[in-house]
Image (cartoon, coloured by chain):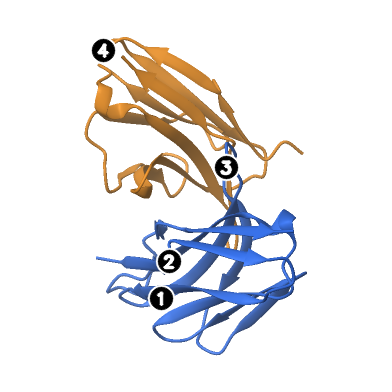
Chain colours: A orange, B blue
Amino acid sequence: NAGVTQTPKFQVLKTGQSMTLQCAQDMNHNSMYWYRQDPGMGLRLIYYSASEGTTDKGEVPNGYNVSRLNKREFSLRLESAAPSQTSVYFCASRNREGTEAFFGQGTRLTVV
Amino acid sequence: EDQVTQSPEALRLQEGESSSLNCSYTVSGLRGLFWYRQDPGKGPEFLFTLYSAGEEKEKERLKATLTKKESFLHITAPKPEDSATYLCAVEGRNAGGTSYGKLTFGQGTILTVHP
C-alpha cells in the first residue's frame, strides 16, 4: 500500500520554465490537496479537490493550476515558474469520513 | 478566517521529562482538529483527529486533548526518537453546516529530546 505518491522528489527550474507536479493516491479517497511549506510560514493550501471533477482555490493559488485527472490523480502545474515558488510541495488525500488525511513525501522545488 | 497558533515554537526536553505542546485555534464551527508529526525531509505523518471538547486520544507516549479554544499534545516520558516537528491543523464548518474540506495549519512546534 503506497499511500500518497508524489513525483518528482526534487526539481530545479529556471525562471519562466513550466512543469507539472504529479500526485497519486491508492486509498480510494475522495478529497485531495496541494500545500506548500516554507520556513516560518507553515503549510499553506494552494488548491484542493473535494471530489473527482471539482477543484477550488486555497490560500495561495496565484501562479498555479490544478487538474483532477481521475479519482486517484491530482496534478499541480506551474506555467511560468518564479523564484517565489521555491518551496517544498506536499500533496495530501483524505477519506470520505474526513477522519484521516495523509501526506506524500514532498517535492522540493528550486527556481533559479 | 480560520487561525491556528502553536506554542512554544521550539521545546527542548531531557529524556523522560514530560511536557505539553499547545495549539490555540479560532474557527467558525470546528469540524475536526488534527495533529501531525513531521520529521526533517519527510511529509507530515497523521497522529490524531479530535472532534469535540473533552475528547482525548492516546498513542504510545502521546495524548491529545481538546477544549473549545485549544488542544494540548501531552508527551509522557519522551525518548530521543520523539524528536520532530509537531503540527496542528483545524477544519471549519461553513454557515450551511458542511465542511470546507480544507485544513488550516499552525506553524508547528519543534521538539528536541536529549538523551
Q: Which residue is mark 1?
A: B30
The disc numbered 4 marks a residue on which chain? Answer: A
Reading the image, the residue beneath label 2 is: B90
Measure how far apart labels 3 and 2 are at the Cα level: 18 Å
Query: Secondary structure beneath disc 2?
Result: strand
Tag 1: residue type? Leu
For residue A112, say whether it is visible: yes
Numbered badge on residue A15? 4
Residue matched to label 3: B43
- Give the residue type at disc 2: Val
Does mark 1 fall on the same chain as mark 2?
yes
Q: Quadrant of residue A36?
A: top left
Comparing A30 with B9, the one in front is: B9
Same chain assignment for discs 3 and 2: yes
Dot 4 surroundings within 10 Å: few (below 14), some, or many (20 or more)? Answer: some
Q: Is residue B52 left or right of residue A110?
A: right
Q: CA distance from mark 3 to mark 1?
A: 24 Å
